[in-house]
Image (cartoon, rainbow, N blue to C red):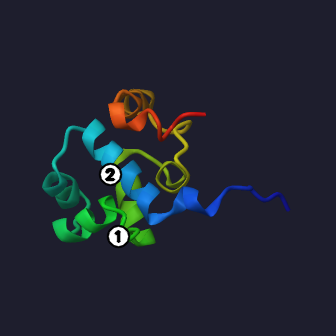
């Protein structure tokens, strides 16, 4: 069986939160708009984005279904299966530059 090697901090609540913030900003949505589209409370979403908690798997799947990203983007920061225009918008965010280097 082939396993993937990665550092656990890649999927930390802080890094997941950053990627959610990048996604939301690339889509041009407020926290209230983003959370409403995935049927989550704004406070819960705010806690995810700030890295206080990670979203549940059910909430993460809702994000994937609603916005066209996959679990690899949210948990591992991989953009290779993200729609091109969305990946380009994410990478264009000034604060995303250092997060996705290398």
Circle 2: element type: helix
Left or right relative to 86: residue 41? left
Above or below 24: residue 41: below
Identify the residue shown where x is 41% and y is 53%.
64
Q: Position of residue 36 (x, y in %)?
A: 17, 60
Q: Which of marks 1 and 2 is nearer the N terminus?
A: 1
Q: Quadrant of the C terminus?
A: top right
- Judge left or right: residue 93 versus residue 37: right
Residue 65, position as x, y percentages in the image: 38, 53
Identify the residue at image location x=47%, y=36%: 98
Q: In this orientation, which residue lies closer to the viewer: 34 or 53?
A: 53
Q: Could you classify mark 1 by the number of other residues whose Cα lies within 10 Å: few (under 14), some (14-19), or many (20 or more)?
A: some
Looking at the image, which residue is at 21% across and 53% down? 34
Quarter assignment of residue 27: top left
Taking depth in this image into account, of 81 and 46 the one nearest to the observer is: 46
Asked whether the residues under the numbered discs 1 and 2 touch, taking CB atoms below 8 Å apart as contact, a structural biologist would say no
Q: Seen from this angle, which residue lies furthest right?
A: 1
The image position of residue 25, as x and y in percent, is 26, 41
- Left of 62 or right of it: where is 1? right
The residue beneath circle 1 is 52
Q: Which mark is residue 66?
A: 2
Q: Position of residue 66 (x, y in %)?
A: 32, 51
**Image quadrant for the N terminus?**
bottom right
* Disc number placed over residue 68 in the picture, else none: none
């Amino acid at each position: 069986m082939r396993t993937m090697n990665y550092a656990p901090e890649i999927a930390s609540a802080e890094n997941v939160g950053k990627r959610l913030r990048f996604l939301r900003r690339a889509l041009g949505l407020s926290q209230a708009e983003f959370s409403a589209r995935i049927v989550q409370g704004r406070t819960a979403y705010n806690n995810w984005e700030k890295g206080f908690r990670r979203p549940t798997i059910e909430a993460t799947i809702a994000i994937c279904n609603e916005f066209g990203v996959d679990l690899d983007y949210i948990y591992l920061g991989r953009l290779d299966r993200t729609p091109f225009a969305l990946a380009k918008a994410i990478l264009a965010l000034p604060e995303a530059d250092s997060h996705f280097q290398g």
